[in-house]
Amino acid sequence: MPMAASSRPQHLIRLGDLTRGQLDDLLDLSARLKRRAKKGGAGELVGRTAGLLFFRGSLRTRTSFEAAVNQLGGQVIHLTAASDFWELEEREGAVMDGRAPEHIKDAAAVLSCYVDALAIRPKPSGSSWAVDRQDGEIRAWAAHARVPVINMESALWHPLQALADLLTLREALGELGGRRLAVVWTRSPAPASPAPVHSLLHAALRFGMNVAVAHPPGYELDNEVMSEARALSAESGAELADALDLTAAIEDADVVYGRSWQSLEDYGNPTLAATRRARSPDWTIDERLLSRGRQARFMHAMPVRRNLEVTDAVLDGPHSLVYQQAENRLHSQKALLSMLLR
């Protein structure tokens, strides 16, 4: 049965919503579920239903989440904004004389009667970073839902990717404290959201990893995210270096994490963004660069543009963890669902 109206559900909007102890437990459970998956399914979610709401497209997130629910014995109701419902108003006290015929407050209350959890991928406006970084839509769902709300990637955060990344890092490196992670901007004609990098950055620092972030001028990550990252670095004793060049960041790294993210300075201005990208043509990860690490592994959240962001030789080579990383979305999300709904 869906959660009672009097309950106060735990949401996952960002990884910071979980304590370090909860993260450790989740990773341990993820590893156990991964081992158990080879012996057959489990029934943690029998009789439970998860609602998946997509306001923009998805490949890995939708498939891995549906598979996670199904393998735990639950059921999924999948809704896509473009075909299954309509625009929703998120502003409190709004006079609803615009395009949205329904408020998130009402949609969240109703859906909470039908499902045991809501996983949502909102669609940022793409016109103002100051507005989009507030993550108003996903936070409105969390404010009004009476069941757990799980963020499947907002403008600012992608906690599900970070959980899978942590599991992959632990599998590859063992103890993470003191290991070196290089987060490297890569070029693309259509740069993606910085949300996975924001979440990974905080996750790695919380686990004591030394992090080097490399990007061309103008591709700085969100100011408040970086401010929190520096505080996490001081708290854990881990090193954090930002705005390095490509070679310096990868030097002696244990893991190189590639990602193309958009310039927040040019956010909402595609002309200026294209001009800025044209000034950084050489940010491609190849075997020569990867060899500067310490037998460095390569990770990427995907989708990835081959031979533009990273070469075939790296992606298909022995040090690539991209498919392991993608598979771990399934196991870490099963652990999360089990934790939130047990």
Image: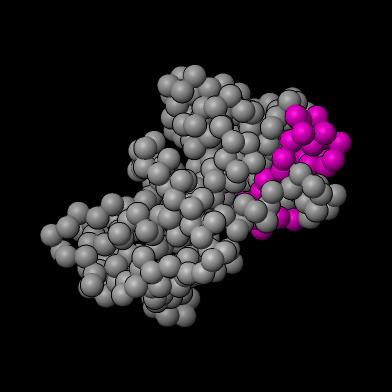
Q: Is residue 275 visible?
A: no
Give the residue at x 36% y 42%: 22
Q: Which range of residues does the magenta coloring cover?
A: 280-305
Give the residue at x 40% y 44%: 25
- Residue that sits furthest to the front in the current view: 39
- Choose between 243 and 131: the one closer to the eye: 243
- Residue that sits furthest to the bottom in the current view: 83
Residue 193 is left or right of residue 322, and the answer is left
Rendering coords of residue 332 (x, y %): 49, 54
Q: Is residue 202 visible?
A: yes
Up-down relation of residue 11 to residue 217 (above or below): below
- Choose between 171 and 61: the one closer to the eye: 171
Give the residue at x 56% y 32%: 175
Residue 160 is left or right of residue 302, and the answer is left
Residue 171 is left or right of residue 216, and the answer is left
Up-down relation of residue 327 to residue 314 (above or below): below
